[in-house]
Image: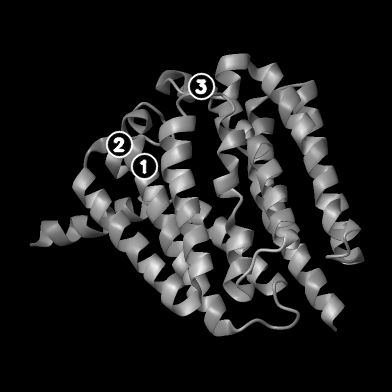
Amino acid sequence: MTTAIAHSPSLLRQYLVLTKPRVTQLAVFCAVIGMFLASPGLPDMGLVVAGTVGIWLLAAAAFAINCLIEHEVDARMLRTKRRGTAQGTISTLHVLMMSGLLGGLGMLVLYHLVNPLTMWLTLATFVGYAVIYTAVLKPLTPQNIVIGGLSGAMPPALGWATVANSVPAEAWLLVLIIFIWTPPHFWALALYRNHDYEKAGLPMLPVTHGKRFTRLHILLYSVVLFAATLLPFVIRMSGVFYLASAIVLSGMFVRYSWMLYKEYSDELSRKLFRFSILYLALLFGALLVDHWIRLI
């Protein structure tokens, strides 16, 4: 009895890891920003809570399926070999049951407490990430993260649909920003984890085309990202506060990318990867603050 209890937290943590909580938090955060931007004032907080819960549940389910599909690949990579699916401590049946439960609850919450549009869009995002990206694109092409990035870029649209029951151009602009941000974000990780991906047999860009080619693409994408982040101000979706924030943050992103392109080091690649996560959170946070400033 004592032994079983002692091992329970560890097993529960293994299940939690399958939902990729840090990635889920960033995705849900961007969705919540979309919810607040969709309303001219404060949105219906009941919709915000229900939408947040529903989107989180479906995102967690998608990540669990991702871990299940990639369990053999994960077992060969240092970063992921401790996942329960990679070690075999969590069975396929249990992952499917967990994912089905989380996904089913998420769909029910979104359909009944939010609106059908949000449910269908979130379900499509689930299929796009868990099946099309993970099972089809990732093992076949070095452009996997570019093509499959759309599913990961969808949270602002899901959040917008939660409150407005529609997805206007402004929401898709936020999706575009995350879509362009995704490749340099993941390629920075792939650079310093290059040997891991090579060992796993995944055709990530540094493996198929080399590090310098990848660094050039990171730099080019960061420049395009800089331009894309100015668009909310151009279309008068945001004001001066956001514009200043976008220029500073995107300028730092380009600077990191330029330094990485000029002279590579694993440490600098790690710094760019970590900064890219903070960058997206601060950028979307600036959008929200600017939205509130303009309401005052």
Q: Which quarter of the rendering shows the N terminus?
A: bottom left
Q: What is the quadrant of residue 239 in the picture? A: bottom right
Q: CA distance from mark 2 to mark 1?
A: 8 Å
Residue wearing tag 3: 203
Q: Nearer the viewer, residue 152 or 185?
A: 152
Q: Nearer the viewer, residue 259 or 3?
A: 259
The percent coordinates of residue 3 (x first, y second) are 12, 56
Q: Residues within 10 Å of mark 2 (few under 14, many from 20)?
A: many
Contact check, label 3 and label 1, Cβ < 8 Å = no
Q: Residues within 10 Å of mark 3 (few under 14, many from 20)?
A: some
SS of the residue under disc 3: loop
| Chosen colour scheme | one colour
Q: What is the quadrant of residue 270 in the picture? A: top right
The label number, if any, that marks residue 67 in the structure image: 1
The percent coordinates of residue 92 (x first, y second) are 22, 44
Contact check, label 2 and label 1, Cβ < 8 Å = yes
Q: Earlier in the sequence, mark 3 or mark 2?
A: 2
The percent coordinates of residue 23 (x first, y second) are 52, 52
Residue wearing tag 2: 86
SS of the residue under disc 2: helix
Q: Nearer the viewer, residue 235 or 193?
A: 235
Q: Is residue 188 above or below residue 38?
A: above
Q: Earlier in the sequence, mark 3 or mark 1?
A: 1
Q: Nearer the viewer, mark 3 or mark 2?
A: 3
